[in-house]
Image (spheres, grey):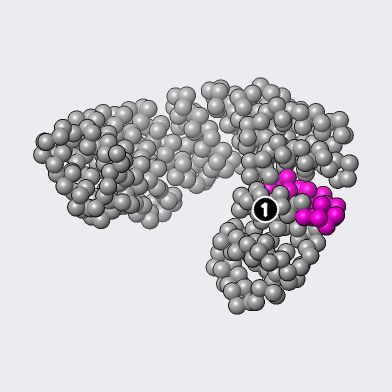
Amino acid sequence: LMKAVKRTSHSKEVFVLLSVLDDVDDTVILGDDIVFHSVLEACIVHQQRLRLTTLVDRYLTSPSLVPSVHLSSTLIRACGVLGRRQDCDSLWREMVETRGQVPTHIALGCMLDSLVRCGALTKAIHLFREWKSKVPPSIVLFALLFKGCATAGAVEEAQSLHRELREDNVEMNLISYTSLIDVHTRSGQVKEAKRLFTEMRSEGIEPNVVTYSTLLKGFCSEGNMNEAASTFREMLDRGLSADTVTFNTLLDGCAKNDHFELADMLLREMKRRDVRKSHVTISIMIKLASKRIDLDGAFEATRGEGASLPSLDAQVAKALVQACFHAKQPLRALSVLEEMCHWPGQPQPDDALLSKLVLGLATSGHRSEAVDLAILHLQSGKGTASLSALTLKQLLQKLRPGEDLYRSLKGAISAAGMKLPH
């Protein structure tokens, strides 16, 4: 049954199948090595964090079996997913010290992955080297550490591991090269990232979309949009399909570096290839229109997509509000709230959006409109959920004590039962 859960991709099926566990006695699950492993794996695959937490807690509180190395590995992996570093360390010590079990390649991989997830890269590298004599190093283990280096921005550690890999005569693969390129692009060493990209191809390892996207991100971050465009065209010429993330990377680079013609070409290419826009794409389109002082174009970016319009959120609305202030049309920013009512799912404004609105209006000389908006949300019962006490305090500081606007806002805050920070 749990193997069936792992295979399905339908959330309703996952919920129904896992709910069977609610009627099963703990001893049936926690008392059998294979069953417990299967249940943990199913929960990990489908990110069932609450159920995973319950299972791990029950086992750690009263372990009902001596786990195999295989089960210990899965328990460590589960604790890594949950960010429970101390439990990972404890389970590892019990396995290798208390029970004297020798970890397999998979067990060490699970421990390294968990340490990396918990931000303990240095510990992961030390453990990897400590067990080298008993668990031969493989490209899978190196790739896990490269991934950790990328997340931590630890370029020197990644370079040291790369030299170690060569000394150990371990052959690189696509995943390890992509992770290593990612480390260097994140650290601003794009020239070295490109050298690694060339090196991997000389070794007969062809980059995939993820590799290309990683390198493109590096070119965009340093403002080298000509190189980014050339690399993107090379990727397409090789028959690889650019996804939404790839297009977003390039479009964001265009927005940051004012490459409007390239952005227009990319949007046309995106439409021609029928690549669906995401809410991130829409936010970037708004930013591009804003830089062109084309406020109508910014609003149009959130319309005209018909049924294919992606789920828009408060972040998109925030970008639209920012575009209004940038175009020196602060009152038009108020219309964004009305626009949101027509978006798919009708997203609600969050404090970040409302804060930008009310404080932006007050700063631009429209204090009355700012206070009216704040009072509207306070009176509608959304005060604590949508407009923070800190935002209200900042708005009060922009008003003159004793004036009507100040008194009105103070009265609405009191009526809503909110307490402002000192």
Q: Vertically, is 217 above or below 304?
A: above
Please give the name of the residue rendered at 28% of the width and 53% of the height, measured from the top-left corner. 382
Please give the name of the residue rendered at 41% of the width and 54% of the height, measured from the top-left corner. 307
* Observer-nearest of 288 and 346: 346
Look at the image and say whether residue 377 sits in the magenta stretch: no
Q: Vertically, is 314 above or below 185?
A: below
Residue 33 is drawn in which quadrant?
bottom right
The answer to whether any part of residue 361 appears in the image is: no
Main secondary structure along the magenta-highlighted residues: helix
**Left or right of residue 305, residue 210 in this image:** right
**Kind of residue at badge 1:** Asp
Q: Position of residue 385 (x, y in %)?
A: 33, 52
Please give the name of the residue rendered at 10% of the width and 39% of the height, measured from the top-left corner. 404
Q: Residues within 10 Å of mark 1 (few under 14, many from 20)?
A: some
Q: Position of residue 344 (x, y in %)?
A: 38, 54
For the record, the magenta segment spans 94-114
Q: Which residue is mark 1?
A: 87
* Observer-nearest of 17 and 385: 385
**Left or right of residue 383, residue 91 in this image:** right
Please give the name of the residue rendered at 70% of the width and 36% of the height, measured from the top-left corner. 122
Q: Position of residue 162 (x, y in %)?
A: 77, 31
Q: Position of residue 118 (x, y in %)?
A: 63, 44
- Judged from the image, the secondary structure of the residue bearing numbered disc 1 is helix
Residue 207 is drawn in which quadrant?
top right
* Observer-nearest of 46 and 286: 46
**Left or right of residue 408, residue 296 in this image:** right
Q: Vertically, is 24 above or below 267?
A: below
Q: Quadrant of the N terminus?
A: bottom right
Look at the image and say whether residue 102 sits in the magenta stretch: yes
Q: Quadrant of the C terminus?
A: top left
